Structures are given as structure tokens and as C-alpha cells.
Image (cartoon, grey):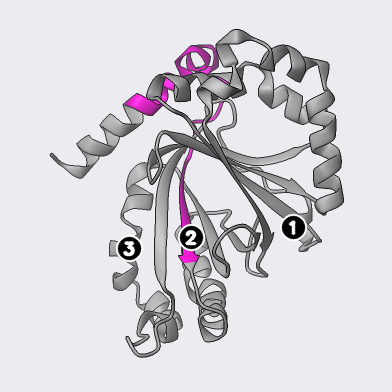
Amino acid sequence: MERRQFLAGSFAVSALAAAGQQAAQVGTAPSPEYYQLRRYNLLSGQQVKLTESYFSEALVPTLIRWGLAPVGAFKLDIGPETPAYYLLIPGSSIDLLVDLETRLPSDNQFLTAAAPFWNATASAPAFQRVEASLLAAFNGWPKITPPDAAATKGKRIFQLRTYESPSNADHVLKVEMFQSGEFDIFRNAGFHPVFFGDTLIGSRMPNLTYMLSFADMAELETKWNTFRAAPAWKKLSADPRYASDQIVTNISNLVLSPLDCSQI
């Protein structure tokens, strides 16, 4: 089976999660984008320095030059197995993101800037492993929305949350729940969501991942308290159709801070 056919099939399954919303939005909303979310597992010391330099001097500038922006580059502050860096890459099509690794070696400008990282030897590797997933933006949140502080490199942190479901049907219900009122509850509670993505290819599927931005940990706690106390959330979460203990079996919750080269 060709790659495009496989990916198209994967997306078709995922798209069922928003089918009810899509019909209402045809012709009025921008086409949802796709995301490649990478995690670079590192060792403290030289690997951290080398990877950050690789991001800022080679990879992120190349992605921006190719029109894959805004790029998010983050350091894991709270979560398992640190140190680790995360990279969020948006694209208007699946092919643009899937072909990244095959396109990079043909870009001489990139290879020159990337040489210390790209040519690292087995005796002094640049990283431990890289994990990546491919996501499709929700129809109700079709584009990345960087926080205002990103433009001025102001203080900000990010919460990256992944919800795993016990079945494909339950996963579809959780995505539906976001697009049936949960987005508005986030807005009314004063949150700044960055993206919502349905995982097409990745580990621990079926799942979805989304990112929120805050000024600091104090604001994070305050906003979540407001969210949980909101009458609209209490009503939505009490709906038997969306019983959380049935449609979500595990939640991963990470706190990240932006690297200097991050556009988000």
C-alpha cells in the first residue's frame, strides 16, 4: 500500500470524530492543519547544548524558510525522563510533514548549519532517541494560536496534555466533547489554548493531545480551578454520553518552557 493511501485511511478514521461539526463549518472556517510533534530524549550536558544549537541555528530556521511555521521548541520542565526537548511543527498537508526527513539532506544551507549535530559520532551522539507523532488539528480549532507573549519573548509556560481512550468509539466521543462546548469553557475560564490535535500516527493510540499557555504556574492553577467550577463544565461533564471515567483511561500532563528559538 502506498504511503499516501495509508495516511489517507488513517485520517479518514480520525475525521469521524468531528464529522458533525465539519458540515456546519464548510466554507466558513480555515482548513485544519497537521502537526508533527517530536520528543528528543537527551542526556544532561553536551547533548542538551548541541540539540538546542541544532534547533536554533539549523532546524527551526529551515522549517521557517520552508513555510512550516510557527514552530514551537520547548524544554520539558515537569514530566518523566528529563532532560527532553519537544518540537511542534505545523504543516498544511500530511506530505509536507512526512517528507521532512527525506528533504533535509538535500538542503545544503541546512546541512552546513546542522553539521555538528547531524554528523555526531557513535562515541559522542547528539541525542539518545527521537520519538514523533503525526496529528490532525480539530475542526473546531484548526490552527496554532501562539500566546501574545511569544511575539515579545515574554515569560510563559505550556501545559501539554494527552488523553488516551479505551476504544476508537470512546476516542471519537472525547473529541466530540471538546467540540460540543469544551472549547467555549476554556475561553470563558481565561485559558489560552495553543492547539488541539487528534493523533493519526503515534504511540498509545487512540489519543488526542492539546497545549495550553500560561504566564506561570500560579496562573495555571487559578485557571484550572475556574474551569472545574464553571457551571457549563459541570453540566457537560455530567452528560452520560461524555462520562470521563469511561471515555478517558489515562491522562499525561507535562509542563514545558519555550526555548529562545521558539515562535510559540
Picture coordinates of residue 219, whole percent (x, y): 85, 46
Q: Which residue has dot 2 on it? A: 39
Q: Residue furthest bottom?
A: 123
Nearer to me, 92 or 146: 146
Picture coordinates of residue 93, whole percent (x, y): 39, 42
Q: Nearer the viewer, mark 3 or mark 1?
A: 3
Q: Which residue has dot 3 on it? A: 101
Total labels: the figure holds: 3
Q: Which residue has dot 1 on it? A: 151
Say which residue appears at 44% left-offset and 59% top-offset: 66
Mark 1: give few (<14), some (14-19) or many (20+) Cα within 10 Å: few
Picture coordinates of residue 10, whole percent (x, y): 31, 33
Q: Nearer the viewer, mark 1 or mark 2?
A: 2
Q: Amino acid at mark 3?
A: Glu
Nearer to me, 63 or 19: 19
The magenta span reads 13-40
- Whichever of labels 1 and 2 marks the residue nearer the N terminus, that label is 2
Say which residue appears at 46% left-offset and 35% top-offset: 207
Q: Quadrant of the N terminus?
A: top left
